[in-house]
Amino acid sequence: MTAPAYDPDNIFAKILRGEIPSFKLYEDADTYAFMDIMPRADGHCLVIPKTPCRNVLDASPEQLAAVMKTVQVMAHAVMKAFGAGGVTLQQFNEAVGGQEVFHLHFHILPRHEGVALRPPGKMADMEVLKAQAEQIRAALG
Ligand code: 5GP
């Protein structure tokens, strides 16, 4: 089955172009990391490639490698920032796979013993998100 074409007007493409705001955590030449606005755990963040692709199915090996490198950087940073014992990674492919924004992204969710993920879809308090972003940036050093 052929996947639909990449839509350059998806939300994350707009974030990359600076057309809508985001709480930036980290960037390098190929990737960008920022806070998820509906966090399912404190420190829930997203890593995306700067170049277009919908998801893992159409990403190039280079895009995947660059994104995973940043995922590892951010996993360490959120664990340090929130004193987490581990992280859960989530990544969805196409609508039937649970994807809602069609620009490749990995979710990084800091985890604590006995603490369940919150349900999806609840917008964060922007002041709290801003403070948490500062905490993560500080942990990046
Ligand atoms: P997914 O495609 O992985 O199912 O879900 C997309 C994710 O993007 C959700 O976790 C949602 O909270 C997040 N998200 C949706 N719109 C925005 C936005 O405008 N800004 C940010 N930072 N995150 C968003």
Image (cartoon, helix red, strand yellow):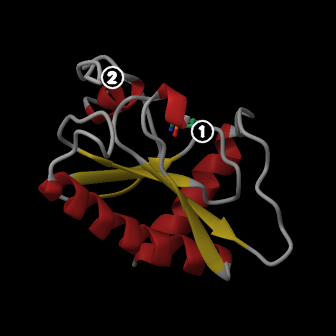
Determine whether the residue tagged by mark 2 lies in a helix, strand or loop.
Answer: loop
Answer left or right for 41 relative to 108.
right
**Residue carrying label 2:** 19
Most extreme residue toward the front, as rendered? 1
Residue at 59% x, 49% y: name it.
130
What type is the residue that disc 1 sits on?
Ile
Residue 8: which disc?
Answer: none
Where does residue 135 sit, x and y in percent of width and height?
A: 57, 67
What element does badge 1 sit on?
loop
35 vs 130, nearest the viewer: 35
x and y percentages locating residue 86 in the rendered image = 62, 78
Residue 131 relative to residue 10: left or right: right
Question: Would you place residue 126 above or below residue 118 in this image?
Answer: above
Q: Residues within 10 Å of mark 2 (few under 14, many from 20)?
A: few
Residue designated by label 1: 37
Which residue corresponds to the image point at 66% horizontal and 46% vertical from the top-left? Answer: 39
The amino acid on which the numbered mark 2 sits, given as a three-letter code, is Glu
Q: Counting residues from the N terminus, which is met first, the one under dot 2 or under dot 1?
A: 2
Assess whether mark 1 and mark 2 are in contact (beta carbons under 8 angstroms): no
